[in-house]
Image (spheres, rainbow, N blue to C red):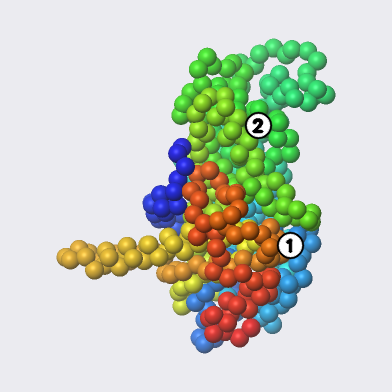
Amino acid sequence: MAALSWAAALRGARGLCGLAARGAAGFLRHGSPRTYAAVSAESLPTFGFLLDIDGVLVRGHNVIPAALDAFHRLVTPQGHLRVPVVFVTNAGNTLQHRKAQELSALLGCKVEPDQVILSHSPMKIFSQHHDKRMLVSGQGPVVENARALGFRNVVTMEELRTAFPVLDMVDLERRPTTTPPLRSDFPAIEGVLLLGEPVRWETSLQLIVDVLLSNGNPGTGLVTAPYPHLPVLASNMDLLWMAEAKMPRFGHGTFLLCLEAIYQKLTGKELRYEALMGKPSLLTYQYAEQLIRQQAERRGWAAPIRRLYAVGDNPMSDIYGANLFHQYLQRAECAAQAEQQGAGGPQKQWPSATQSCTSILVCTGVYRPQEPSAREQPFHGHRDFGFSPALLRASHVVSDIHEAMRLAFREEGWTW
């Protein structure tokens, strides 16, 4: 897959917009109904927040103090959020409801599961792959996560290496002492699902490549590797992320970089993705926008949400994605206006009321104020997202999440 320019990414995402909207809306319609306290008309919000988690609200298992201050002001005495909030993380090694429970405990307010978007959450809308036999890579409850996304026939790395033990040969202590008979009863794998960085990179890299080169039959092998290869769906393109350590840690984007390099070195061809999800993917922001709208509807906030404030600590994912989404919204609005003004043609309403997405960069995670400018530092984004330095520049740079929310409230004319 040739590297996409940001303009090409915008054009490609336009077709996904309706699909993401229908998928997200359909998912939420099946959710359990909730009731909320009525909100006075003068306090109806027309803006909301898309909040990153690691490096913005927490560092590892520790909550950032500024986050507690911010949510103390963001929550009413009745325990309700003053404006709609969706937590958009590139993490994916937990279940959605568990992440919501964790955030509730850390922040001291009720966070619902459908306020949390994990890196792989938009995979729910890729129903054409849900019945395929998929090899799943990651850590944590990968099977439960895959099934929650709609995938009904998954194979784990451990199941694959148990079926074909001679494939995993890097660790001397895990090598089989005898050669087992060749399995002929193992159904072919039809696709690969990458939910996040695995624990044993050497095992996952080897087995994923085996599956792609053998067209899903790693026990037999092929003389010529098929191309295009089996579909690969991946989430979380972060090269780095911030935990308790003073320096950033490798993310799933680093694992993808290794996988792409190995595949190209072996075949001379480029590894292609059926879908890439997580920030900075436009599909993730489209999905988040729909959750914001549904949340506002459940709260009885009749005024449409016009403006989103995306707060993050990683310029390469949070800021790049928010700016890309803002640019997309501007182009979409222009296209809708042009369509409505067309001579003699029927007027069509653009499905989104959102007009802007403001990017706010905090200094409590990956980003450091003393870093060189975007034009001077290497591009850490994924291969399939073309490098545009302008998209790395945040609309605002603030110290922490408390300052970010105060800035947004001031911009909206609300009391903080």
Tag shown at residue 58: 1
Residue that label 2 marks = 205
Write the residue at 54% across / 85% down.
Answer: 413
Write the residue at 21% across / 65% down.
Answer: 342
Q: Nearer the viewer, residue 226 or 105?
A: 226
Q: Position of residue 388 (x, y in %)?
A: 49, 54
* Residue 84 occupies quadrant: bottom right
> What residue type is disc 2 on?
Leu
Q: Nearer the viewer, residue 64 or 385?
A: 385
Q: Can residue 120 be seen at all in this image of the molecule?
A: no
Disc 2 is placed on an element classified as helix
Vertical placement of residue 215 versus 119, above or below: above
Q: Position of residue 401 (x, y in %)?
A: 67, 70
> What residue type is disc 1 on?
Val
Vertical placement of residue 357 versus 279, above or below: below
Vertical placement of residue 328 versus 154, above or below: below
Write the residue at 47% across / 64% down.
Answer: 326
